[in-house]
C-alpha cells in the first residue's frame, strides 16, 4: 500500500506542471471582450504562441473563426488561427493617410496594400473552411482512406494565393518612398509569412498521416 501511495504522489507531481501550464498559458494576456460567431467562444489558442481568440475544438484540434472580412474588421496579427491563419491588421495610419491625401506619389502603394488586405480576408475565410473540414474527418476514416485530400488541395491553392500576396506587398514596399509606410508594409508581410508557414506545416501534418487505402484515394483526387 505504501508503494502504491508513493506512485500516486510521484504521478501527481509529474503531471502537475502540465496541468498548471494548460491553466495559465494565456494568463499573462487579459481575456478580450470580443463577440464570437455562432458556435465559437473566446478560448486560449496555443498555436503561434498562446493567445485569446474565437475558437472551437474539433476532434482534439482547435479551429479558430475566420476573419469577418474587410479592413475595418482586422484585429491585428495577434489574432492568429490555430490552423494557420493570421488576421491581417487594418492599414496603419500612414497608409490610411495616403488613401485620403490627394495625389501623393505613394497613394498607389497604399491602394495596392488595401487590395491585398481585402483579398487576404476572403482567402482566409476559404482556408479556414477547408481546414475545418480536414480536421472534422473522423479518425477511422483517416485510418482507412486518409485525410481529406480534396480540401487539402484547396488549402494548397490558398497557400499559393498567400505567397502571391507576399510578392505583391514586397513590390509595393520597394515602390514606397516613406520609411514609415515601408515599416507598416513590413508588418503586413510578416503576418502573411506567418500564415504561409503555419499553413505549410498544417498541410505536411495532414498529408503525411498513415492510412491503409489513402494512396488509392490520392490517385483519384488529383
Image: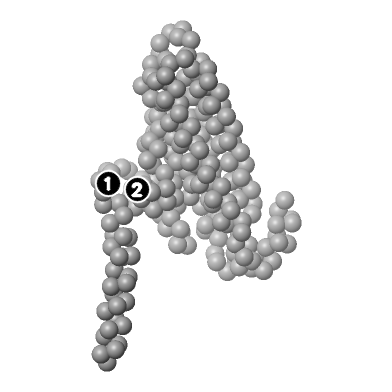
Measuring from the top left, give residue 179's x and y in whole percent: 42, 19
Q: Which residue is mark 2?
A: 51
Which percent across, then down, holds residue 180?
39, 20
- The residue located at (53%, 20%) in the rendering is 174
* Element at label 1: loop
Where is residue 204? Give x, y as percent.
Answer: 58, 53
Residues at marks 1 and 2 touching, judged by CB atoms closer than 8 Å: yes
- Is 6 drawn above or below residue 199 in the view shown? below
Q: State the SS at label 2.
A: strand
Q: Relative to residue 107, is residue 22 drawn left or right? A: left
Instruction: Tell me the residue at 31%/55% (across/down).
Output: 25
Direction from residue 214 to residue 2 in the image, left or right = left
Along the polypeptide, which appears first: circle 1 or circle 2? 1
Residue at left 63%, top 62%? 146
Q: Residues within 10 Å of mark 2 (few under 14, many from 20)?
A: many
Q: Is residue 116 above or below residue 27?
A: above
Q: Quadrant of residue 138?
A: bottom right
Asked whether the viewer can see residue 96, the reply is no
Residue 174, label in figure: none
Tell me the quarter of the image containing the N terminus: bottom left
Give the alpha-carbon distance from disc 1 to disc 2, as whole Å.
Answer: 7 Å
Image position of 18 (left or right of 160): left
Question: In the rendered image, which residue does mark 1 sit on?
Answer: 29
Outermost residue, bottom side? 1
Q: Report if residue 25 is visible in the image.
A: yes
Residue 155 on image: x %, y %: 59, 46
Q: Nearer the viewer, residue 164 or 32?
A: 164
Amino acid at each position: 500500500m505504501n508503494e502504491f501511495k508513493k506512485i500516486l504522489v510521484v504521478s501527481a507531481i509529474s503531471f502537475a506542471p502540465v496541468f498548471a501550464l494548460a491553466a495559465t498559458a494565456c494568463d499573462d494576456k487579459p481575456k478580450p471582450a470580443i463577440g464570437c460567431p455562432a458556435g465559437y467562444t473566446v478560448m486560449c489558442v496555443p498555436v503561434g504562441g498562446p493567445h485569446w481568440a474565437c475558437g472551437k475544438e474539433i476532434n482534439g484540434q482547435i479551429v479558430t473563426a475566420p476573419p469577418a472580412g474587410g479592413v475595418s474588421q482586422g484585429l491585428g496579427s495577434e489574432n492568429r488561427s490555430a490552423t494557420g491563419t493570421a488576421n491581417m491588421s487594418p492599414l496603419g495610419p500612414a497608409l490610411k493617410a495616403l488613401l485620403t491625401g490627394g495625389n501623393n506619389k505613394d497613394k498607389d502603394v497604399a491602394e495596392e496594400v488595401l487590395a491585398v488586405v481585402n483579398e487576404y480576408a476572403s482567402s482566409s475565410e476559404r482556408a479556414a473552411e477547408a481546414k475545418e473540414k480536414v480536421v472534422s474527418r473522423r479518425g477511422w476514416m483517416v485510418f482507412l482512406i486518409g485525410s481529406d485530400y480534396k480540401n487539402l488541395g484547396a488549402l494548397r491553392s490558398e497557400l499559393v494565393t498567400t505567397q502571391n500576396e507576399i510578392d505583391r506587398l514586397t513590390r509595393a514596399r520597394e515602390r514606397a518612398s516613406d520609411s514609415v509606410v515601408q515599416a507598416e508594409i513590413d508588418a503586413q508581410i510578416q503576418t502573411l509569412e506567418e500564415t504561409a508557414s503555419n499553413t505549410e506545416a498544417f498541410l505536411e501534418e495532414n498529408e503525411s498521416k498513415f492510412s491503409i487505402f489513402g494512396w488509392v484515394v490520392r490517385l483519384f483526387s488529383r
